Image (cartoon, rainbow, N blue to C red):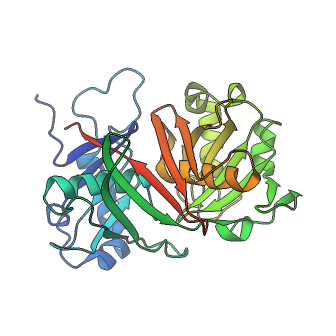
């Protein structure tokens, strides 16, 4: 029997893969707000239809051939609305690589002219603060054409991510805390900064890059299960501790050249090769702790390197590229 086809466009941004599909292809005709409210009814089938491996998955592959689904645009002209669907069927407030991919798809369709900012609005149904719109611009970084995303100002601390009270071990700005469930897995994982950059993050800083967990370790059954309970939302494979709505986890360390290295375990996804908002959270926390100098920061992840820029008011910009793979 022939393998089923994937009725969507697949793109790769720094090893983070998303499928892009028009709302009409999923029968979503009532607008983005209604689609977000009803996502539990249609998202699992959409993920199965668009993010499932055609045929036999490669050896050692993740359960899905992409890290999620981008549904949109809901309009023919800007501003453009979209939904970001995790492979567990939940909605995400924001994804830096996902928005880079979505902007690249808009450019392919002639909807994103060069050097002209366009506003993207992500809709979600979770009882969390709205991430706000993101302006995207086709531009270059050096000689590389791509997309600049204006992600706004981050906020810090347990209250920013609706975390349960954690033990503050440094009263700096941002506050450094110990997350007991992380520290119980590895005593070196005891210095964490909570960051919201439209979505919630817990950045755990380590002394050296060699101490970062490997991707193989993050995918090992025992650690994967333990981190899923921490990162995923309560009722969606997770236990809501420290954050009932779940949280993205990062481990980061400074490099000798003034850049940062990071690993990522995403809420609703698990270990990922890279994440744009994770890189932004890592860079913004490191800048405020004085671990790196700004305003430009590079964050290296297994899937690729994310260039970031901090504005004078603390707002963060992220540069990314994406390529069509199917």
Residue 26 x %, y %: 19, 62
Total number of numbered discs in the rendering: 0
* Placement of 319 over or under 16, stated as above or below: below
State which quarter of the image contains the C terminus.
top left
Residue displayed at 75% across by 50% down? 290
Residue displayed at 17% across by 75% down? 29
Query: Is residue 220 visible in this depiction of the protein?
Result: yes
State which quarter of the image contains the N terminus.
top left
Residue displayed at 27% across by 61% down? 115
Between residue 309 and residue 164, name the one nearer to us.
Answer: 309
Between residue 238 and residue 10, name the one nearer to us.
Answer: 10
Residue 211 x %, y %: 72, 28
* Placement of 1 over or under 102, stated as above or below: above
- In this picture, residue 265 sits left or right of residue 104: right
Direction left: furthest residue = 2
Query: Is residue 87 visible in this depiction of the protein?
Result: no
Residue 46 x %, y %: 26, 55
- In this picture, residue 9 sits left or right of residue 272: left
- In this picture, residue 241 sits left or right of residue 302: right
Residue displayed at 66% across by 53% down? 202
- In this picture, residue 77 sits left or right of residue 40: left
Direction top: furthest residue = 59
Residue 273 x %, y %: 47, 36
Instruction: Place residue 99 in its image quadrant.
Output: bottom left
């Amino acid at each position: 029997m022939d393998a089923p086809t994937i009725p969507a466009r697949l793109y790769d941004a720094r090893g983070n893969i998303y499928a892009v599909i028009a709302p009409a292809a999923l029968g979503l005709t009532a607008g983005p707000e209604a689609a977000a409210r009803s996502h539990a009814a249609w998202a699992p089938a959409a993920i199965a239809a668009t993010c499932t491996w055609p045929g036999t998955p490669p050896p050692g592959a993740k359960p899905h051939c992409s890290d999620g689904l981008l549904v949109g645009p809901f309009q023919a002209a800007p501003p453009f609305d979209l939904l970001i669907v995790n492979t567990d069927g939940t909605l995400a407030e924001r994804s830096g690589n996902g928005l880079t991919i979505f902007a690249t798809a808009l450019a392919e369709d002639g909807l994103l002219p060069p050097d002209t900012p366009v506003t993207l609005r992500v809709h979600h149904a979770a009882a969390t603060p709205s991430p706000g719109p993101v302006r995207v611009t086709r531009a270059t970084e050096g000689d590389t054409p791509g997309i600049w995303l204006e992600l706004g100002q981050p906020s810090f601390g347990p209250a920013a991510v609706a975390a349960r009270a954690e033990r503050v071990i440094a009263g700096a700005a941002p506050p450094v805390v110990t997350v007991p469930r992380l520290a119980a897995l590895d005593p070196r994982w005891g210095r964490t900064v909570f960051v919201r950059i439209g979505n919630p993050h817990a950045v755990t800083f380590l002394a050296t890059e060699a101490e970062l967990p490997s991707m193989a370790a993050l995918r090992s059954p025992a650690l994967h299960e333990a981190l899923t309970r921490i990162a995923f939302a309560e009722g969606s494979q997770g236990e809501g501790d420290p954050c009932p709505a779940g949280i993205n986890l990062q481990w980061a360390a400074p490099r000798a050249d003034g850049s940062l290295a990071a690993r990522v375990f995403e809420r609703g996804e698990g270990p990922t090769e890279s994440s744009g908002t994770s890189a932004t959270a890592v860079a913004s926390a490191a800048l405020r702790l004085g671990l790196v100098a700004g305003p430009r920061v590079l964050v290296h992840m297994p899937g690729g390197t994310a260039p970031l820029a901090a504005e004078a008011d603390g707002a963060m910009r992220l540069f990314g590229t994406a390529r069509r793979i199917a």
